Image: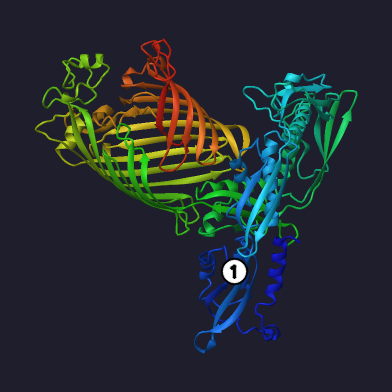
């Protein structure tokens, strides 16, 4: 019996002998039961710090002793994997000897003072040490010692050492209970694949088969390690590939190796030969169902997508059979039995499948259980379920409910199971929930701010996404940077009772510094953005006319002609919305109202702004009020980490008008996004997806109807008359038109992007390849078809972080433009050639999520 098993047996025995007193064993109710624990005394500790034990014992001081309480303490102590066993003795203490002192005598496992590794040449010592569980600083257990050797073997196997042998031994100093462990390694020869051949493959060629397996011949790009684990996996992949191409009898009968090493090789070079028996190719003969009374044959046939007479794809057939079975499961018939019979017709080389079903009663939901809750109140998740107690069970609703729970964004994982109920014909769905970190106190540096502002800022933020376990969100945040300082308080709740009626309040204050701002060339003559005669249009200081300003592509003049100002905004906002849930997705109707006061502060004796709105904000505090209306249809499976689905939305912003205020415009945003998982793999022991995403949006600044005292009173006025350049549409160069300089003051923006995103670390880092095309027009009157737009193209690849506060992306980008019927590539500074338009740009993008 090893040490680990021995101390577990001893611990069970010691439960019955809590003290050494024979009298205690004779009492029906030991004297210490029900006594308050006032202290612990620990004896025998050698290499385990007493503070570590005391930290575990501390929470039990002051509690009343029970067997259950002691078992809990015992479990926590043994969970440290430091002790062989321990004894506990109850002693009377305190006034009148009415309190309990527990004296614990510990017998430690040997402490590993040194771990020596010998015989390794092909694998670095550090890599081996990282795989060990019994190493310096740990406590010696025989089972962990065996696990360590197996872990090291796996490292060697992965590097092409299939014959490695590892032994271990240790010595223990009885006086100090410290051990020296020695791992002795016999590596054996390293083996690599020099050549891969196939025998018996007449129907499928070898080049095609090589693409299906993981093993590769050694080359400049592939290490080519020979591993038995990979060979076994390759056999399964080959069989699967054959079966999915109609050869369902195909087998890999043998995999042999031949030594083809040369004198110059520093390793054993192998030829790997897969022996294959292909068998005949079969065609699909159809799927029929027998014994069905609840559903008709036509209902089942409508679910079968494989065409009769097509090459039999075995994986697809299994998927079709599962779809047929789901028709029952989604309607509560989970107690049915379903058997599959394969019928072969050798004359036509077709295989048909007969599904025989024995129908039973529908399953009724007897109870619903939630497990793993640590903070959240059960009703927060129960209201996300698409079924209730007493309903007919549905597999589809079971999965949809799990997605709804995940989409609360306060959990990191949701698993589900089905248990039999206490009554015949009933089931109990069980959701195992892992709650995420819902309360954050963050401070440090972040990236963001205004599109033309300083990109790095300090921040202090407190937020609770699950206030009091109710699913409500409360946050207080402040951001500090050289050019922007802001503070905001927000509160939101996605429900009112059992209805998906969301409400939120936001209070905010912002102070920002704007520099490199244009001044007007003529005192009191300001640019409003709606002038039609360029000969009378005001022009910036530093230019001789508006035509010269346009000819310079509206570039800023030298700094002596520019000004700066401080901008202040105090705002309160309210938003509300209602979400309607359907099987195919959710429909959300939303609205919001923001009321703000704005002020621009600058030296009026020195500066005269070019934009009329900046001048008006400089005169006095001005209101800027906005009403937003939104409508969206969300058909995605998950809000975060979307793998499939789509999102359609339409939003309107109504600024000013009958709401009054200085900002006066109407903005329309129409967008559509689609997602599909191209492939799936395992990352950090969880499924991860390579997701192709396509997004298209149309943004339009529309005229507003309001009273403009300077231009004819009430009427429809151009949006440039009632919006600053920051309120107009613009290309930010980070998310829209990635890699370009900022393009302000646009009335129309059509943005399109396609991307392939692959996670590298779950919820932390992703790789992305993208291409985008963005068309803009400064005036709606300029819009005379897609060819009349100024187009900005970008394509590239990079990585992006998904950490809150650091939404950074780093991309290598190639840009191009199309304007006035002329296409041109933009030059970059990386990987340049002799061409003037060569090279890529390195873009640090502050990314935003489409979720």
**Residue 76: quarter of image:** bottom right
Quadrant location of the N terminus in the rendered image: bottom right
Q: Is residue 793 left or right of residue 284?
A: left
Quick check: 808 above or below 523? below
Quick check: 626 above or below 836? below
Asked if residue 387 can be seen in this view, the reply is no
Which residue position holds label 1?
A: 73
Camera-nearest residue between 744 and 815: 815
Q: Is residue 41 left or right of residue 601?
A: right
Place of residue 265 in the rendered image (x, y in percent of width and height, measured from the top left): 70, 23
Callout 1 environment at 10 Å: few (<14), some (14 to 19), or many (20+)?
some
Asked if residue 464 can be seen in this view, the reply is yes
Most distant residue in the right direction = 347
SS for tag 1?
A: helix
Place of residue 614 in the rendered image (x, y in percent of width and height, measured from the top left): 20, 33
Q: Is residue 698 left or right of residue 62?
A: left
Residue visible at 71% across and 72% down in the picture: 13
Camera-nearest residue between 463 and 663: 463
Place of residue 189 in the rendered image (x, y in percent of width and height, measured from the top left): 73, 33
**Residue 328: quarter of image:** top right
Quick check: 170 above or below 327? below
Place of residue 110 in the rendered image (x, y in percent of width and height, measured from the top left): 64, 60
Residue visible at 34% across and 27% down in the picture: 730
Q: Is residue 34 left or right of residue 849?
A: right
């Amino acid at each position: 019996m090893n040490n680990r098993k021995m101390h577990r047996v001893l611990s069970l025995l010691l439960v019955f002998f809590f003290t050494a007193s024979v009298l205690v064993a004779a009492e029906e109710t030991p004297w210490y039961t029900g006594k308050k624990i006032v202290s612990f005394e620990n004896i025998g500790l050698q290499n385990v710090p007493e503070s570590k034990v005391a930290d575990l014992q501390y929470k039990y001081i002051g509690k009343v002793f029970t067997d259950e309480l002691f078992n809990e303490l015992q479990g926590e102590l043994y969970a440290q994997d430091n002790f062989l066993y321990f004894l506990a003795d109850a002693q009377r203490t305190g006034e009148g000897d009415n309190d309990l002192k527990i004296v614990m005598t510990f017998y430690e496992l040997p402490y590993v003072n040194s771990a020596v590794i010998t015989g390794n040449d092909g694998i670095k010592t550090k890599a081996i040490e990282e795989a060990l569980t019994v190493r310096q600083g740990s406590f010696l257990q025989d089972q962990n010692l065996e696990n360590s050797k197996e872990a090291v073997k796996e490292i060697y196997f992965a590097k092409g050492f299939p014959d490695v042998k590892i032994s271990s031994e240790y010595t223990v100093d009885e006086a100090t209970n410290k051990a020296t462990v020695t791992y002795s390694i016999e590596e054996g020869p390293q083996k690599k694949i020099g050549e891969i051949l196939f025998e018996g493959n007449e129907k499928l060629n070898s080049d095609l088969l090589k693409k299906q397996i993981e093993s590769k011949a050694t080359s400049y790009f592939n290490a080519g390690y020979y591993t038995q684990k990979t060979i076994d996996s390759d056999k399964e992949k080959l069989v699967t590939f054959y079966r999915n191409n109609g050869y369902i009898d195909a087998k890999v009968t043998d995999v042999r190796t031949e030594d083809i090493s040369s004198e110059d090789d520093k390793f054993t070079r192998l030829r790997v030969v897969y022996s294959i028996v292909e068998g005949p190719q079969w065609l699909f003969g159809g799927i029929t169902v027998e014994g069905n009374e609840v559903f008709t044959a036509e209902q089942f046939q409508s679910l079968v997508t494989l065409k009769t007479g097509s090459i039999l794809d075995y994986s697809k057939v299994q998927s079709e059979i599962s779809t047929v079975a789901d028709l029952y499961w989604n309607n509560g018939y989970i107690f049915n039995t379903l058997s599959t019979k394969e019928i072969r017709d050798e004359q036509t080389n077709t295989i048909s499948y007969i599904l025989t079903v024995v129908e039973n009663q529908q399953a009724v939901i007897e109870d619903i259980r939630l497990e793993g809750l640590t903070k959240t109140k059960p009703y927060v998740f129960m209201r996300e379920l698409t079924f209730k107690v007493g309903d007919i069970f549905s597999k589809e609703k079971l999965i949809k409910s799990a997605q709804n729970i995940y989409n609360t964004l306060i959990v990191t994982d949701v698993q589900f199971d089905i248990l039999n109920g206490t009554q015949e014909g009933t089931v109990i769905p069980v959701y195992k929930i892992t709650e995420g970190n819902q309360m954050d106190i963050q401070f440090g540096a972040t990236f963001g701010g205004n599109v033309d502002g300083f990109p790095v800022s300090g921040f202090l933020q407190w937020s609770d996404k699950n206030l009091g376990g109710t699913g409500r969100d409360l946050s207080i945040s402040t951001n500090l940077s050289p050019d922007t300082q802001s503070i905001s308080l927000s509160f939101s709740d996605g429900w009112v009772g059992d209805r998906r009626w969301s409400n939120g309040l936001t209070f905010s204050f912002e102070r920002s510094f704007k520099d490199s701002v244009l001044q007007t060339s003529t005192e009191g003559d300001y640019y409003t953005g709606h002038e039609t005669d360029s000969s009378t249009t005001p022009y910036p200081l530093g230019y001789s006319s508006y035509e010269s300003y346009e000819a310079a592509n509206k570039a800023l003049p030298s700094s002596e002609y520019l000004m700066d100002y401080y901008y202040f905004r105090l705002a309160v906002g309210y938003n509300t919305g209602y979400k309607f849930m359907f099987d195919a997705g959710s429909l959300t109707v939303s609205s919001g109202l923001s009321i703000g006061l704005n002020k621009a502060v600058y030296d009026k004796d020195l500066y005269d702004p070019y934009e009329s709105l900046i001048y008006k904000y400089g005169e006095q505090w001005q209101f800027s009020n906005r009403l937003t209306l939104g409508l969206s249809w969300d058909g995605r499976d998950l809000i975060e980490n979307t793998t499939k689905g789509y999102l359609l939305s339409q939003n309107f912003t109504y600024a000013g008008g009958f709401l009054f205020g200085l900002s006066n415009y109407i903005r329309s945003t129409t967008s559509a996004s689609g997602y599909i998982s191209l492939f799936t793999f395992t990352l950090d022991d969880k499924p991860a997806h390579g997701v192709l995403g396509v997004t298209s949006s149309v943004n339009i600044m529309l005229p507003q109807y309001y009273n403009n005292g300077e231009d004819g009173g009430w009427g429809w006025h151009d949006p440039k008359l009632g919006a600053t350049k920051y309120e107009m549409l613009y290309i930010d160069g980070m998310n829209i038109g990635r890699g370009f300089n900022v393009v302000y003051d646009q009335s129309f923006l059509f943005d399109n992007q396609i991307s392939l995103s692959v996670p590298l670390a779950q919820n932390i880092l992703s790789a992305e390849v993208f291409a985008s095309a963005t068309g803009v027009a400064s005036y709606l009157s300029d819009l005379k078809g897609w060819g009349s737009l100024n187009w900005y193209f970008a394509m590239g690849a990079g990585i992006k972080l998904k950490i809150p506060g650091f939404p950074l992306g780093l991309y290598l980008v190639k840009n191009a433009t199309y304007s006035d019927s002329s296409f041109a590539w933009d030059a970059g500074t990386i990987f340049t050639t002799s061409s003037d338009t060569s090279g890529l740009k390195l873009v640090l993008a502050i990314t935003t999520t489409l979720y």
